[in-house]
Image (tube, grey):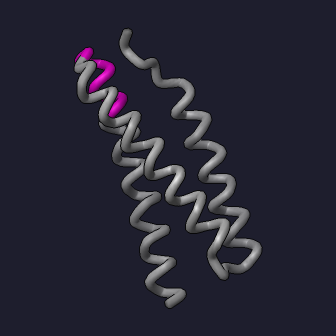
Amino acid sequence: MYDDLHQKITNLEKNILQIEGNMVEFERLKYEDGIKKSIQQLESDLKYLSILANGAPIDKKEDQRIMDFLRIHYDNLQKFSIPA
């Protein structure tokens, strides 16, 4: 079970990084629909990762690493502008 949980967490982290990369490109291209959809997906993935990490039987060091990851990427989310 731990391996499956660890894989889900790893996949979410990779997905979050990919979405952020897409958002940078969408902002550069001024692709508003892409930005909006990416923001929604990023919020969803960050919330899911937070739920997994908070309820997971993981060691303290791994938990701290995930919490740091979440903090950084929630901050990144706040930096992206939502088109009006």
User: What percent of the width, then of the height, locates residue 70?
Assistant: 61, 50
Please say if 9 is above or below 47. below
Q: How many marks?
A: 0
Nearer to me, 74 or 51: 51
Please say if 55 is above or below 76. below
Name the residue rendered at 37%, 14% in the picture: 83
- Outermost residue, top side: 84
Horizontal side, residue 41 vs residue 58: left or right: left
Please say if 22 is above or below 36. below
User: What percent of the width, then of the height, locates residue 43?
Assistant: 47, 42
Name the residue rendered at 51%, 50% in the picture: 46
Magenta span of residues: 23-30
Considering the image in quadrants, where does the C terminus appear? top left
Name the residue rendered at 47%, 24% in the picture: 80
**Is 27 inside the magenta-drawn segment?**
yes
User: What percent of the width, then of the height, locates residue 6?
Assistant: 50, 77
- Outermost residue, right side: 60
Name the residue rendered at 37%, 54% in the picture: 15
Predominant secondary structure in magenta? helix
